[in-house]
Image: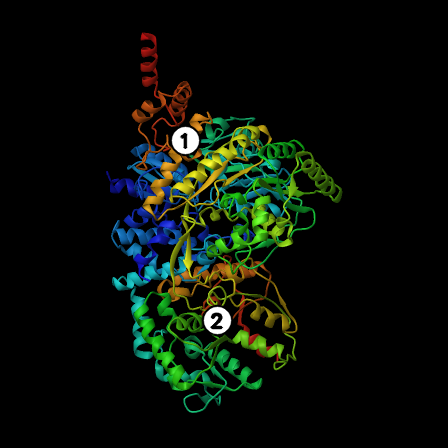
Amino acid sequence: MTLVKEEIYQAFEDVVGKRNISRDAAILESYRVIPCQSSDHRGPYLQKTPVPQMVIIPETTEEVQAIVRLCNKYGIQFKASTTFWSVAGYIGGDYAVQLDMRRMKNFEIDSKNQIAVIEPYVIAAALQAEAMKVGLNINIPGVGCSSSVVASTSSWVGFGPTSISMGCASENLLGAEWVLPNGEILRTGSLGAGSGWFCGEGPGPSTRGILRGKQGTAGSFGICTRMAVRLHPWPGPTFIPTRGTVPAYKADLPDNFKSYTLCFPTWDAYADGVNRLHQNDILYLGHRQFTMFGRDIKTAMIMILNDPDKQLADIPALCEDPYLKEQNEKMKIDIQVIIAGETKRDTEYKEKALNKILELSGGWKSELMMDKDLTDYVLLYLIRLGHKNLNFVMCGGYEGNFGLSPNVFVSSSVMEEASALKKKWEDEHDYIAAVGGDSDMGSICTMGGGGTTGWEFFTHFDSHEKESVEGTADFFNATQDWMTEKKLGTDMGKWNQSARRPDGYFYTQEEQDEMFSKLPQPLVTAYQYKVREAFNPNDLSGSYYRTLSTKKLEEISRSEELK
Amino acid sequence: MSLEDFRPMMDRCSNCLGCKWVPFDKVKSMRFGENCPSVCYYNFNTYSARGRFRLGQIILDKDAEYSDEVTKVVHSCMACGACDVACKVARYNLEPLDHNIALKADAVKRGKILPEQQVMIQALKDEKTMIPGAVKANRGDWAKGLVLKNLFKEKAEVAFFPGCKYSYDKKLQGVARSAVQLLLDAGVDVGTLGDAEACCAGRAHQMGFIDEFDERADANIKAFKIAGVKTIVTPCSDCYHTFKRLYAMRGLDIEVLHIVEYIDRLISEGKIKFTKSVPMTVTYHDPCHLGRQGEQYIPWEGKEKKILNQIHTWDPKRPRYNGAYGIYDAPRNILNAIPGITLVEMERIREYSWCCGAGGGCSETYPEFSAWTAGERITEANATGAEALVTACPWCESNFANAVDENGKKIQVFDIIELVRRAL
């Protein structure tokens, strides 16, 4: 590994000051992550991402720009991250610097125009709290409120429980201040025309597709230093009043907020109900949440999380409780929804419409989840989305897989089969937690009126145990085989496997050429190569942007001609 | 537990970095949403509980040299436990605070200690106090003029234990006198350990000096037994936590009460009656060791047991310390009972309170960092519009007394005992 020269380090230090840069070996080591434990489950057990040359913590856009320019001057890769939740935010090469954006935490709220302008370290929980002070709210994506709003808006799909009423990240992105990989600053949308932050498309350059695309991580060149996001009406108090003993906090919201768990007898009925919910615009929030723990232990976990004196050791006894058993069975195919009425009449209308939809689709409201404490727990859980770390509560490790995101009628038709495959692995091996197969979580939004309710199955594994980690990777291979057989595309657990090698490094261009030349439609990545050439000419902005070089494309074309 | 014993937790920490924030359900603003003084001040992730779990791996795997920077990271944890509460909202099997202290203990074993810590530990050995410059002979100065039973000579219902800070800090000695006078006036049978009183050594534990702590704890437990102590009342939150949790782990089996619990009890029994109004808007700061770390120790022995293939539990069920049952209501009951006082709350309260900055010995080892931490709390207190900041710990009071907010503005600082005395 080549170490940066003293004068280069000094140049970076001059930008941010001695206090905000480090090359201490332990500090650098602490900015590595084990991909197997962080949304890229594939590499060898305990294999980490590379060691950065230095960690830099800038405070302003100007400092970020100066850092990027120095990176270009000295040919050093760079990667910025905020909350370091995902492996996508870590460097992928030896000659690279890691930017930690935690000092950039300013924000402004324009309540009249329902816009928030934020810097990278403003997390969703904080922005939501600030927005609620002026009667507004934000869409918090599924990753939860611990996430940076800039990061999830610029670099992830960004749908979540409230996406049914507020849209996804790509729809909420307005103007952005974007330090391009060459160090230039591009102000997108209306901001680029000097017209403020209100629009992502224009007047001014609309580069939404390049900045983030649909999925997000496939874009993310450079560093977004400020961004505007759309705010949405919040028909509640200026903050979320809470009660309860840690960790069983609950919301004390007024009567215009109602939370229900809707249950259905079959997946067909579920698809019908979810589709009707989507079509009728009555929900503030719709999300299949608690099955993430697993179909067999769902009610047990809900009880544990709502009692400060209970813990995971109580699962077996709670699973034997006759009432919980009965309720668990009734909640087998379920989804959590929240209604938020703007007026009394609006609340009554939405409630009535919800009841009618249940009648038409053959569904019912879970009796267990009508308990006042539980409705208030669900309100807080899903509106703030502050318990995402529960993903890891059972085993220390989790990874989402399957990713059944076509329209709801397609995904629901294969849910039982997918669940059965997972259950088979739970029964035949002990790598993953045995929770009853179905551990799906997802929101009602996007394609097909609920296309992402079959989003991801939570696979719980022990990140400390080698056999569990490696066995989980084997399970993902099996689910990919099933996805391929069903023509359902790439398993979610493998989405980023064409961006980063098992050893944690980014793929070289040669390796990408080898991979992407075999795609059914390689021209997509060839086009992206040209975009990258324009935006990221020195290929320093370590990104997940998949590219097929022009040279390789010409080779393919020649061989096609020869055929 | 040794550092190696924490390896499973290091591997199972999910990198969510929730440990840097108050529980997300409780975030009320961006300005006061974060909870870890160490990472807020030093900024590198390494200073967070997550970073410390990674650091533990790095040290065990010898992935980096034990540099001065590492020593600073390790010892700049205030052991306030805010990360612990935030983590345990969603995690049932991680112990960030215990791990942070284990990291310190490992550093101490390796000789990676700070000069200021050496001075404090030497004072503990020589003078039975961790306040540098204080001498044992002056320990009883705080009680001058009071007639108190010596528990080695006479029996008493309650042993009053002022702790080092109240005993030696001339600005605070009056508070200790007021506290004990309150008890006497309410008819409580009170005694002290007299000359035999010595430092609880809780701060040695917070700094990772476990052997020194053990030695002092055992000596104090022995003294309590000889003196026949059944109930101990202390106005110091550090001593309170040390006796209630740490000494209990070493076999101390007596009732431990903080003075606020006792005063709250006396008020509800009608033994303390307020006669004067104290017209003042105040806000209350929850001391870390009275609040989230003030939970009762419950003996447990057991081992890890996996259920349903990979779900990690403990057999038998292991007690959970997550701040749920800390002492939060007693001080608020007292303030609400004092005529004229209006209590307004800061954003970070109860189990997710922000530290005063004195924890982990940082007021001595990293005074600038400590003052900044206190200043952050003053800023938060000033944002409530309160005229005064009230607390129930001498370390907090002392650290706040000289701190200023981000605009250079001070606030009046009171020990809750002072307000109670004013209202009598």
- Estimate how packed mark 2 is, as few (under 14), some (14 to 19) or many (20 or more) residues with alpha carbons within 10 Å: many
Q: Position of residue A157 (x, y in %)?
A: 50, 34
User: Residue furthest toward the top?
Assistant: A562
Measured Cα–Cα span from mark 2 to mark 1 = 58 Å
Same chain assignment for discs 2 and 1: no
Output the chain of dot 1.
A
Mark 2 or mark 1, which is nearer to you?
Answer: 1
Q: Quadrant of the C terminus of chain A?
A: top left
Helix, strand or loop under label 2: loop
Is residue B35 visible in the rendered structure shown here? no
Q: Position of residue B413 (x, y in %)?
A: 53, 69
User: Residue furthest toward the bottom?
Assistant: B153
Which residue is located at x 63 percent, y 32 percent?
Answer: A272
Would you place residue A143 above or below residue B233 in this image? above
Output the chain of dot 2.
B
Helix, strand or loop under label 1: helix
**Rendering quarter of residue B41:** bottom left
Q: Nearer the viewer, residue A111 or A492?
A: A492
In this figure, which residue is indicated by the disc labeled 1? A480
Label 2 is placed on what type of residue? Cys
Query: How is the model colour-coded?
Result: rainbow
Would you place residue A194 above or below residue B317 in this image? above
Q: Nearer the viewer, residue B261 or B235?
A: B261
Is residue B157 visible in the rendered structure shown here? yes
Q: Quadrant of the N terminus of chain A?
A: top left
Q: Are marks 2 and 1 in contact (CB under 8 Å)?
A: no
Would you place residue A199 above or below residue A466 in this image? above
> Is A341 situated left or right of A393 in this image?
right
In this figure, which residue is indicated by the disc labeled 2? B393
Which residue is located at x 40 percent, y 26 percent?
Answer: A535
Label 1 is placed on what type of residue? Gln
